[in-house]
Image (cartoon, rainbow, N blue to C red):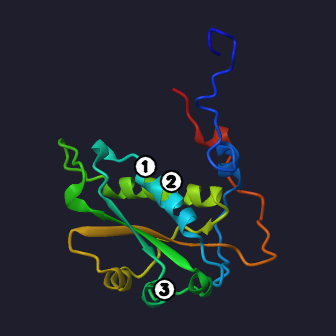
Amino acid sequence: MHANGKKNNTFVKKNGDMEFYKLIEQRETLREYDPAKKIPDEVLKRILNAGRLAPSAANRQPWTFVLVSSENKLNEVKESYQRHWFKNAPHILVVKGDKTKTWIRQYDGYNPIETDLAIAMDHMILAAENEGVGACWIIAFDYEKLSKAIGLKENEVVYCITPLGYPPKGYKKRGKKIRKELDEIVKVI
């Protein structure tokens, strides 16, 4: 509350169409895509911008977001993950990082590239949900096929990819997440 008695909404504003915690509760992995329904450029731009705004160690931002949308490149990238539903995605997002551009922890040489890329991908997956666009976090891809398809350089790595697309007509979300209770996973010390 401000001194004038009015509520301060600085941190309770909605971004997009969905309140943040509701968005987290309702986000589900999508494994069915309508290949004919492309995502408008302005929606894709908002999703990608969410990744751009993600934090990274020492703000190095060691990433490049590769949005695969052309039929030719989609066919190449889709060879890296052999699931029938993946073949229907109209777009695939690849988050790649440059290991030479990350901050390195001095006392043990730890390189947080995987963490930086995961945070950026998570921001974009949540943004996609906010836009009504489905996504599916994928790490079980064929690294060699994907590397070749996107022209990955020696100093670059990929830890995750996601298809982006709209569900087919008539698709229904499961609506129930199976998660442990909070008291099972939190320890206050």
Number of numbered discs on residues? 3
Say above or below: 165 vs 188: below
Measured as percent of width and height from the top left, residue 135 is found at: 59, 68
Residue appearing at x 21%, y 74% in the figure: 154
Residue appearing at x 58%, y 37% in the figure: 186
**Mark 2 sits on what residue?**
123
Q: Amino acid at mark 1?
A: Ala
**Numbered label attached to residue 161:** none
Measured as percent of width and height from the top left, residue 121 is found at: 47, 59
Q: Are marks 1 and 2 in contact (CB under 8 Å)?
A: yes
**Numbered label attached to residue 78:** 3
Q: Are marks 2 and 3 in contact (CB under 8 Å)?
A: no
**Numbered label attached to residue 54:** 1
| Mark 3 or mark 1, whichever is nearer to me | 1
Residue appearing at x 57%, y 56% in the figure: 127
- The N terminus sits in image quarter: top right
The disc, 3 or 1, on the residue closer to the chain's N-terminal end is 1
Q: CA distance from mark 1 to mark 2?
A: 7 Å
Q: CA distance from mark 2 to mark 3?
A: 23 Å
Circle 3: element type: helix
Q: Amino acid at mark 3?
A: Lys
